[in-house]
Each structure stands twice: as C-alpha cells, then as structure tokens.
Amino acid sequence: MPELPEVETIMRQLKPRFTGKTIDRIDVLDPLVTAPQPPRTLARLTKGRNVADMARRGKYLLFELDSGDTLVIHLRMTGRLTATKTPLKSGEKDRLRLLVRFRGGAAIAFHDVRRFGKAFVLPGEKAAGYWEKRLGPEPLERSFNRKFLGGITAGRKRPIKSLLLDQKFIAGIGNIYADEALYAAGIHPLRAAGTLTGDEVARLVESIKATLRRAIRLQGSSIDTYRDTGGRRGRFQETFRVHRRQGEPCPGCGGTVEKIKVGGRGTYFCPACQR
DNA sequence: CCCCAGCCCTGGTCGC
DNA sequence: TGCGACCAGGGCTGGG
C-alpha cells in the first residue's frame, strides 16, 4: 500500500533519472487508469512534453511538465512503477495499465493488479485549487506542528486514527503509519480527537514525523505487493511494532497486540500502552 | 459542518 | 476439487 514513504522512495528514484527527459508518448493499456479523463486527453497533453521536475504531494506522484501542466499518478492499493531501459518482455506485460515512453528508449511502466490506481493530467491553472480541496499539509514540513494538530483535533469527536487517515487534514498518512505513529505516541486509536491533551498532541506530531522519516530511510514497507522502481522490497515492515502483529507480544510491555476496526480499517494497537 | 457507511477492484484465504 | 463468502483499503460519494 503505497503511502507517503513509499511514494517518496519512488519519487527519489525517478527524479534524477527522468527529469529533463521528453515524453515520446504514453500508451494506455487499460482505460480505467485514466478515468474519468479519456486516454486521448492524457496522451495529447503529454506528447512531446519535457519533464521539468518531479515531486510528491501526499501519496500523489507528480511529473511537472514544461507546459505548466502536471502528470499525476496515484498508486492506490497495488499500483507499481517500474523504470525500464528496454522494451518490456512479454511476462512483464501482465497487468500493465500504462506505459510512459521517453525519447531515447527509457520508459516507466505502471502495473496494477487491483485497477484502483490512477493517472491523469492536471492543468496548471487548476493545480492549486485541486490540492487545496483534497490535501492538508505535508507532515514532514514545519507547518505540521503541535499548533496545527491541536487546531484540527480541537472539538472533534471522531477517533484520532480516522483523522490521521483523512487526507484533507494531513497528507500522506495511511493505515500502516497511523498505527505505528499512534503506538509510538502511546495514544489509543479510538480516542476522540478532541480529548487529546497538549502533551499528547506534541508527542503525536513527533511520532508521526519520526515514523515517516524512519520509513523513508528504510525505503517503505513491503507487506504484500509494494516494490520500488527496481522491483526491490522496502524494509520498514521488519520494524513494525504493532501493525499486522495481532496476538503477538507488545515490544513495550509484553502484553498482547490487538486488532479492531476503526473507520472500516484494520487497526492494530497495544491496549496497555495506548490510552 | 461533521462523520460514517458503502462503493470500486482483484487475489488470497477459509469453510464446507 | 470447486465454490461462495469474506477480507485487504485510498479516495470519493451519499446520506443521516
């Protein structure tokens, strides 16, 4: 499940390799990947454009084009990007949804088993409004601090974990990192957001930043399908404290890690350490 | 405005 | 061996 650390890892791998390259053409093998935008729109707005820069916003990967438009890719649950130098072999065409071909022969292949992933072109004049409507601040930037988190938790009754997962409040945190950050902060995932004390808010800010930074350093988490652009696994899953460890001992107190549902998502926590 | 249930997708697992 | 039920969950919509 590519969340912020996984998308960041992919972006850092692609950026030096593809910045400055020119898109020859994009092949859309599954029209669902561009929906509701028709494949021809994506093809037309990217053909012959130069990649001026690459970036990440939340879980979105951005190719900033010399036209001022942005090619946006979201991997959702099972999407994978593979950087290739040569045309794909037949076996690699399984579940290939999109192929970005660059002048000179390099390409980026977008594979996706579940077909949730998306690719679309965001016109330059619409970009600011698009992100503003959907995404809160980047959790690794200075603007994400105790004052900000205190502001968005105040008065809210929804569980703190649901709030962390809501991209409109904070961009990029998914199920894995919400569980791990709440554990590190010693906060129960079902706590009503508005009941967090000032200390807890401060701890949670630091836990989120530390967890994400460590995950980026370990190149993300590979539980199931996630791989980087070279097909390699991340290593953060080897350091999970609670996520996907129900029934196992808590590394802090030796009690048993439990699993519940919060906002429809599987949630792992230690009932003794998280209050 | 706030919050949650349900939907989209497919492969893997489980019970019968 | 086959088959249906169910689960995984990011982002979005609809409704209370």
Image (cartoon, coloured by chain):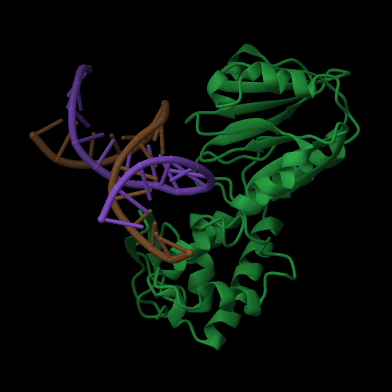
Chain colours: A green, B brown, C purple
Query: Residue at image x 37%, y 65%?
Result: A248
Query: Residue at image x 58%, y 51%?
Result: A221
Q: How many marks?
A: 0
Task: Provide residue A3's location: percent of width, then percent of height.
Answer: 59, 50
Task: Provide residue A131's location: percent of width, then percent of height.
Answer: 67, 49
Left or right of residue A59: residue A274: left
Residue at the farthest right position: A20
**Up-down relation of residue A132 to residue B2 (above or below):** above
* Residue A18 in view: yes
Left or right of residue A26: residue C9: left
**Up-down relation of residue C12 to residue A67 (above or below):** below
Left or right of residue A217: residue A116: left
Task: Provide residue A213's location: percent of width, then percent of height.
Answer: 69, 63
Query: Residue at image x 42%, y 78%?
Result: A274
Query: Residue at image x 47%, y 31%?
Result: A114
Left or right of residue A37: residue C16: left
Residue nearer the viewer, A119 or A219: A119
Residue nearer the viewer, A27 or A152: A152
**Up-down relation of residue A94 to residue B13 (above or below):** above
**Up-down relation of residue A249 to residue A260 (above or below):** below
* Residue A242 in view: no
Residue nearer the viewer, A49 or C13: C13
Residue at the farthest top position: A90
Residue nearer the viewer, B8 or A19: B8
Task: Provide residue A134's location: percent of width, then percent of height.
Answer: 59, 51
**The C terminus of chain A: image quadrant:** bottom left
